[in-house]
Image (cartoon, grey):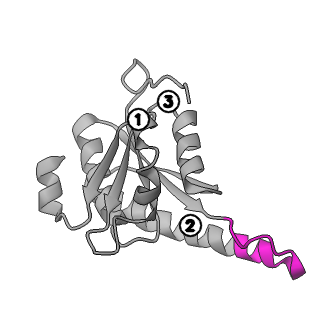
């Protein structure tokens, strides 16, 4: 990935990318990103990745039905997240739905939007670990094209307000 970031150049504004998934802590990442957007006059891009495993079934259009249901679920999740961001910061975040491997899709979204200046993730505070995306990303974070902010999933709104 060699795309030059342009977040702070004239005619651009910095954005942070937030992953909206099925984990309980996605709200912490959205809250942090929304507060950050207020502070810097930036924007938020919300990404929902639909993993396409088990969708190779072609019998009676099952794959098409599964894909349509996944799209509906993705839109509903992004509606909730966008509503939360709007309530926090009176912003309307950009929404992106992608299909495929989450890491590949995250990197592609970053590569295609030169204004994305950071990725915000939230970590599960429980004993089962930080979450699937953070666990996978940990392997590539050293060569990642932008800074990655990991928000502890048990921070309160007031705690995040103090940090953002």
Residue labelled with disc 3: 114
Q: Residue furthest top?
A: 10
Residue labelled with disc 2: 74
At mark 1, the secondary structure is loop
**Mark 1 closeness class: few <14, some 14–19, many ≥20 residues within 10 Å:** some
Q: CA distance from mark 1 to mark 3?
A: 11 Å
Image quadrant where residue 146 sits: top left
Q: Nearer the viewer, residue 76 or 128?
A: 128
Q: CA distance from mark 3 to mark 2?
A: 24 Å
Residue labelled with disc 1: 146
At x 57%, y 72%, the residue is 73
Which x, y percent locates residue 157? 17, 62
Q: Earlier in the sequence, mark 3 or mark 2?
A: 2
Q: CA distance from mark 2 to mark 1?
A: 25 Å
At x 12%, y 58%, the residue is 159
**Mark 2 closeness class: few <14, some 14–19, many ≥20 residues within 10 Å:** many
Which x, y percent locates residue 76? 52, 70
**Mark 3 closeness class: few <14, some 14–19, many ≥20 residues within 10 Å:** some
The segment highlighted magenta reads: 52-67
At mark 3, the secondary structure is loop
At x 47%, y 65%, the residue is 21
User: Does 112 appear above or below 21?
Assistant: above
Q: Nearer the viewer, residue 46 or 24?
A: 24
């Amino acid at each position: 990935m060699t795309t030059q970031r342009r977040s702070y150049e004239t005619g651009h504004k910095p954005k942070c990318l937030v992953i909206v998934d099925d984990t309980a802590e996605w709200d912490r990442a959205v809250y942090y990103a929304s507060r950050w957007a207020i502070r810097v006059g930036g924007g938020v891009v919300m990404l929902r990745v639909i993993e396409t495993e088990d969708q190779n079934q072609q019998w009676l259009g099952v794959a098409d039905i599964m894909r349509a249901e996944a799209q509906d679920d993705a839109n509903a999740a992004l509606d909730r997240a966008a509503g939360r961001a709007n309530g926090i910061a009176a912003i309307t975040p950009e929404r992106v739905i992608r299909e495929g491997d989450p890491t590949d899709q995250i990197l592609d979204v970053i590569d295609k939007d030169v204004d994305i200046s950071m990725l915000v993730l939230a970590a599960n505070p429980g004993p089962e670990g930080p979450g699937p995306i953070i666990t996978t990303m940990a392997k590539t974070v050293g060569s990642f094209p932008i800074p990655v902010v990991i928000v502890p999933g048990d921070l309160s709104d007031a705690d995040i307000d103090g940090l953002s």
